[in-house]
């Protein structure tokens, strides 16, 4: 099953467990957010929205908030001693699609638990492995 969602003026085709970088949305890291503008729900019998599918939503877990690459707009008018340099970086939210919801259902899964790093103890200088 897939869905086509619209967020931040762009459209994305998503399936569960997809990781996307979208325009910044509200939500703390680790929380589940619902994206409500679903244009198409696909599968055995696709459902097209006019313009959106009623009762459909996509649940996603917020993984990170970060900034995109630096974009520089440099304008120069030759022989006029005129230059303008502007730059900006987009605010980006990284999300993982958890499930595609239809018929007004609520998300059934919560955020995934964080993986703990395994701590390997260093051998003590006095010990020898036999």
Image (cartoon, rainbow, N blue to C red):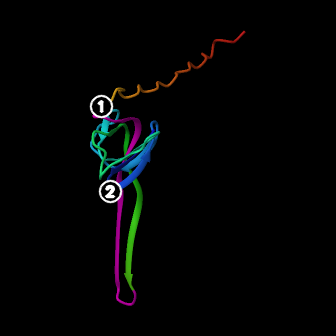
Between residues 91 and 62, which one lies in front from this camera angle? 62
Residue 9 at x, y = what percent? 32, 56
Question: Which quadrant of the figure has residue 36?
Answer: top left
| Residue pictured at 72% horizontal, 9% vertical | 130
Between residues 34 and 29, which one lies in front from this camera angle? 34
Residue 105 circle label: 1
| Residue pictured at 40% horizontal, 87% vertical | 78
Judged from this view, the residue extending furthest toward the top is: 130
Between residues 51 and 10, which one lies in front from this camera angle? 51
Up-down relation of residue 38 to residue 116 (above or below): below
Q: Main secondary structure of the magenta part?
A: strand
Residue 70 circle label: none
Up-down relation of residue 32 to residue 46 (above or below): above
Residue 117 at x, y = what percent? 49, 25
Up-down relation of residue 90 to residue 3 (above or below): below
Report how far apart the C-alphas of labels 2 and 1 lie in the structure.
Answer: 25 Å
Within 10 Å of disc 2 (Cα), the crowding (few <14, some 14-19, many 20+) is: few
- Residue 101 colored in magenta in the image: yes
Question: Which quadrant of the figure has residue 105?
Answer: top left
* Total numbered labels: 2
Question: Which quadrant of the figure has residue 112?
Answer: top left
34 relative to 13 in the view: left or right: left
Residue 110 at x, y = what percent? 35, 27
Secondary structure found at label 2:
loop
- Residue 36 colored in magenta in the image: no
Residue 96 at x, y = what percent? 41, 38
Q: Nearer the viewer, mark 2 or mark 1?
A: 1
Q: Which residues are magenta?
A: 78-105
- The residue wearing badge 2 is 9
């Amino acid at each position: 099953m897939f869905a086509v969602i619209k967020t931040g003026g762009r459209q994305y085709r998503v399936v569960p467990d997809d990781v996307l970088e979208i325009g910044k949305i509200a939500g703390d890291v680790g929380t589940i957010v619902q994206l409500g503008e679903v244009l198409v729900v696909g599968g055995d019998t696709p459902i097209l929205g006019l313009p959106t599918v009623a009762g459909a939503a996509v649940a996603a877990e917020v993984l990170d908030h970060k900034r995109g690459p630096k974009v520089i707009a440099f304008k120069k008018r030759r022989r006029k001693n005129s230059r303008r340099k502007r730059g900006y970086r987009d605010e980006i939210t990284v999300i993982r699609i958890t499930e595609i919801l239809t018929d007004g259902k609520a998300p059934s899964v919560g955020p995934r638990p964080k993986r703990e790093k395994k701590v390997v103890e260093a051998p003590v200088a006095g010990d020898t492995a036999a």
